[in-house]
Amino acid sequence: MHDPYKALYLHIPFCVRRCFYCDFDSSAIPQDNPAIDEYIDGLCVQIRRNANEGELAQIETIYIGGGTPSFIGSSRLTKLLYMISVSVRLENVREFTMEANPESINECIIKDIWALGVNRLSIGVQSFDDEVLKILGRAHSSSEAKRAIECAQQRFENVSIDLMCGIPGQSIASLEDSLVKAASCGVKHVSMYPLTIEPHTLLNNMVLAGEFPEPDEDEQALHMERAESILVQAGFSRYEVANYALPGYESAHNVAYWTGVPYLGLGRSATTMTQNSERRGRIRDGIVLDDLNKSQMVAEDIMLGMRLAKGVSVEDIANASVFLPALQATLDELCADGLIVFEEGRYRPTHKGWLCGNELYGRIYDLAP
Ligand code: SF4
């Protein structure tokens, strides 16, 4: 027996080409490759099967990610979205996001996905600087990004964009220019992630060959600070370590991930989190990623709460302390070290805590026996 899934994630593992830093599960294949049709057919079968088993009855948020969902084109997306619309009670779905990249956004896709229930578009812009886009190996230019945002806004009121920072070769002036453009183009949400060099990526090979410098941590911290300063001044609030929203536009689907809400992932490399009152487990492609006991679940909830600006309430701490007797002492130490702060009945992460996230999250999670 498990608690009902409230969030649904669907993975589309195809892109027009591989970005140099990418370690997501995605293949660059021609758009007319029949493997994409077979994949979408398989995904539709999975959606139907889960609907028949009652697993989709209480879904409140849906996220189609990738890869590049917009790459597969309007007719395949229409098939997929139609299957979702007859399998999930869309009147109960408060947020339905699809990811898209600028080079594959067009009027036809925008009109079709909007008509079939998608109500939030997340666009992978990464930068408004063509030189930085070249360093990352992105398939679009800054002018295409601007055009794509405007095109999306013809139907979508709720548009989010992703940006990246801390990229070797990206000056502070370039970053600031991208942030100012992001803040003034009418989007409601901005995600800002520092570049990380992952194994098995082209950038990693270049770093190993001495052809590309490793990102500088101090530079990345400076970029994250500038992002906060510019976006907050423009009316966005930093509600999570890497996410900014205008009031009321925080991503409900992503918040579900950070607040212990069970989610079902369908498609290749999609993760499913299943839980009941005693255990929580994650599974991907049939492989168990983790299997948490009650203490570990509770520790994870407190740890994830520290990703959010609102932090964790004293009531949550009192409940968690039943399973984590050393929690209060650890929170006191984290306060003394400046990683969190106690104010208005909540423990919240500080800027230092977010910058030293691994230490903050690790010291909380390590409390679980
Ligand atoms: S668009 Fe996204 S998923 Fe596709 S290759 Fe680039 S980073 Fe990877």
Image (cartoon, rainbow, N blue to C red):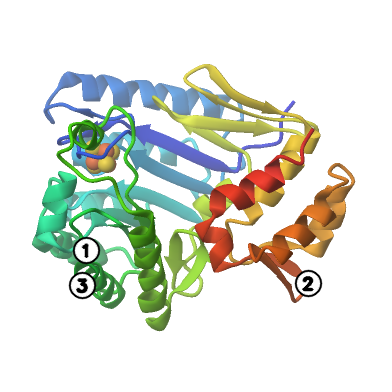
Quadrant assignment, res 152: bottom left
| Crowd band around label 3 with a 10 angstrom C-alpha radius: few (<14), some (14–19), many (20+) | few
| Crowd band around label 1 with a 10 angstrom C-alpha radius: few (<14), some (14–19), many (20+) | many
Amino acid type, mark 3: Ala
Secondary element at tag 1? helix
Q: Residue at x 66, y 62 (%)?
A: 311
Q: Earlier in the sequence, mark 1 or mark 2?
A: 1
Which labelled disc corresponds to residue 345?
2
Q: Is 26 situated left or right of 300 in this image?
A: left
Residue at mark 3 to residue at mark 2: CA–CA distance:
39 Å
The x, y position of residue 31, in whole percent, is: 13, 31
Secondary element at tag 2? loop
Q: Earlier in the sequence, mark 3 or mark 1?
A: 1
Residue at mark 3 to residue at mark 1: CA–CA distance:
22 Å
In this picture, is 149 found above or below 291?
Answer: below
In this picture, is 345 found above or below 273?
Answer: below
Amino acid type, mark 2: Gly
Which labelled disc corresponds to residue 173?
3
| Crowd band around label 2 with a 10 angstrom C-alpha radius: few (<14), some (14–19), many (20+) | few
